[in-house]
Amino acid sequence: TSMMLFLTKPTRQDSQGFTLLEMLVVVLLVSLLASLLMQGFVYMSGTYHAVERRQLRAQQQELFEGWLRDSIHGVINGVDGEFGKNNQFSGDSTSFSGLSLGSLAGQSPGTPVKIVWSLEQKNGLVLLRYGEAPLAGGAMIWYTLKEWPSTVSASWHYLHNGEWLSSFPLQTSIFARNKKTALPRAISLYVNSVPVPIELIVSVRGNPNEYAPPVIEGVL
């Protein structure tokens, strides 16, 4: 019996892997893609934070305007009783004070309180401060509601008989003799800020007539 041997020629491996040049090209492409992705991430992150800051400033501005509006809307020219009737409204370009039914410090709605809105300069800043105290007595509690750089100028103005005044009431002999002065029709806060000046005008909804206690028939 003869034995036959079958010899097969070994097959050649066609796969030789990546060359060094191909690997360098791949690394370069991956680096470029990562760089583009990182730049896009940084840009989107910066845009997100910028939008977030604008929204926060807008919310703060809306809150501030709401507080100012509620307080001035509630201004009254006097209430009956020992404490209220002598607290008349007065103001100049830096501050105003009086009575308001719009408490911002937690008093019940409709409860008259003493209020002061003041513009002050401190530590290189222009501060808008609000003070409130109970009508029956007690310490004035102060809050800083707004800050601007010292380069900004701000002032209060008062609308009376169709004219904007820098102080109220008018310092005339009539007002000097009669302390029961009327309220202004509106109060304006003008802020000469950059790039756009701001002016907030709020109407006074209280009785604009002179304050007088009620007359009870049969009682002097």
Image (cartoon, grey):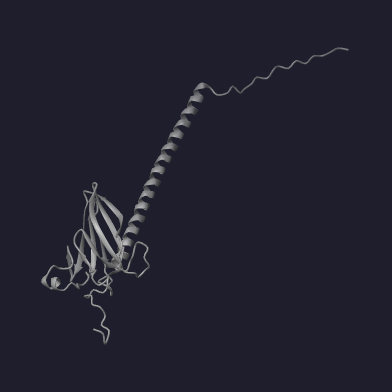
Q: Would residue 168 be visible to someone looking at this image?
A: yes
Q: Position of residue 31 (x, y in %)?
A: 46, 31
Residue situated in front as seen by the camera: 154 or 167: 167
The vertical placement of 170 against 120, above or below, is below
Q: Position of residue 186 (x, y in %)?
A: 24, 67
Q: Would residue 197 be visible to someone looking at this image?
A: no
Residue situated in front as seen by the camera: 105 or 158: 105
Tell me where residue 171 sits by quadrant: bottom left
Q: Position of residue 139 (x, y in %)?
A: 30, 60
Quadrant, the N terminus: top right
Residue situated in front as seen by the camera: 4 or 84: 84
The residue depicted at 29 percent of the width and 54 percent of the height is: 146
Instruction: Judge from the rendering whether residue 48 lies leftward or rightward of residue 175; answer left or right.
Output: right
Q: Position of residue 194 (x, y in %)?
A: 24, 50
- Residue furthest top in the image: 2
The residue depicted at 35 percent of the width and 58 percent of the height is: 63
Q: How many marks?
A: 0
The residue depicted at 26 percent of the width and 61 percent of the height is: 116
Quadrant, the C terminus: bottom left
The residue depicted at 49 percent of the width and 23 percent of the height is: 21
Tell me where residue 209 sits by quadrant: bottom left
The vertical placement of 119 against 30, above or below, is below
- Residue furthest left in the image: 173
- Residue furthest bottom in the image: 218
The vertical placement of 83 against 200, above or below, is below
